[in-house]
Amino acid sequence: MQAKPNGDLILASAHSSELKEFGWKAPCGNMPAAYLTGLLAGRRAKANGVTEAILDIGLHARGPGSRIFAVAKGAVDAGLNVPHDDSTFPSKERIQGEHIESYSKKLTSDVETYKRAFSGYLGQKLKPEDLASHFKQVEEKVKAA
């Protein structure tokens, strides 16, 4: 975004719902989707000649490892220079959804709870136990676009 007298000019953007164009089957409000959205926005910004950005999180929670910092990590990994502290980024395992996989495996013995907790995944024919590999496939498609 560039500040202009008549209003801000958006130079690049991305929305998590756009991940479906890259084959994303998981819900769009989780940690892996946040990272992929940041990666997509960062790649678009780079394609438009943007080399640096400032993370303005407004009133979002500032807790280390939160989704907003997953977005920032995606933008940094896309090649944008974003001032940051690496300790605020979620771990690679959380970015790839391994925590979701682990939780889903714990619930497999309780079929009803499993189905209720992961209906968004199952409705898209994605087993939550396969999220990390699905993440990597979509990540490669975003990088190739």
Image (cartoon, rainbow, N blue to C red):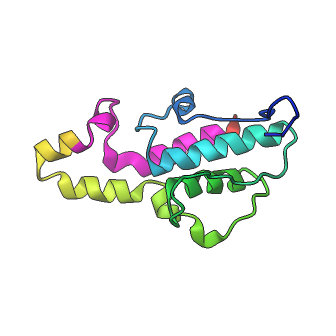
* Outermost residue to the front: 5
In the picture, measured across the screen, residue 30 lies left or right of residue 74, that is left
Q: Is residue 128 magenta?
A: yes
Residue 68 visible? The answer is yes
Dividing the picture into quadrants, the one containing residue 124 is top left
Return the x and y of residue 45 as percentages of the image width and height: 78, 40
- What secondary structure prevails in the magenta region? helix
Point 44% across, 51% down: residue: 132
Tally of numbered discs: 0
Q: Could you tell me which quadrant the N terminus lies in?
A: top right
Point 62% across, 52% down: residue: 57
Q: Looking at the picture, does residue 38 appear above or below residue 66? A: above
Q: Is residue 111 magenta?
A: no
Q: Could you tell me which quadrant the C terminus lies in?
A: top right
In the picture, measured across the screen, residue 69 lies left or right of residue 82, that is left
Dividing the picture into quadrants, the one containing residue 36 is top right
Return the x and y of residue 135 as percentages of the image width and height: 49, 46
Point 63% across, 39% down: residue: 142
Residue 143 visible? The answer is no
Return the x and y of residue 144 as percentages of the image width and height: 69, 38
Dividing the picture into quadrants, the one containing residue 100 is bottom left
Segment tinted magenta in the rendering: 117-142
In the picture, measured across the screen, residue 142 lies left or right of residue 8, that is left
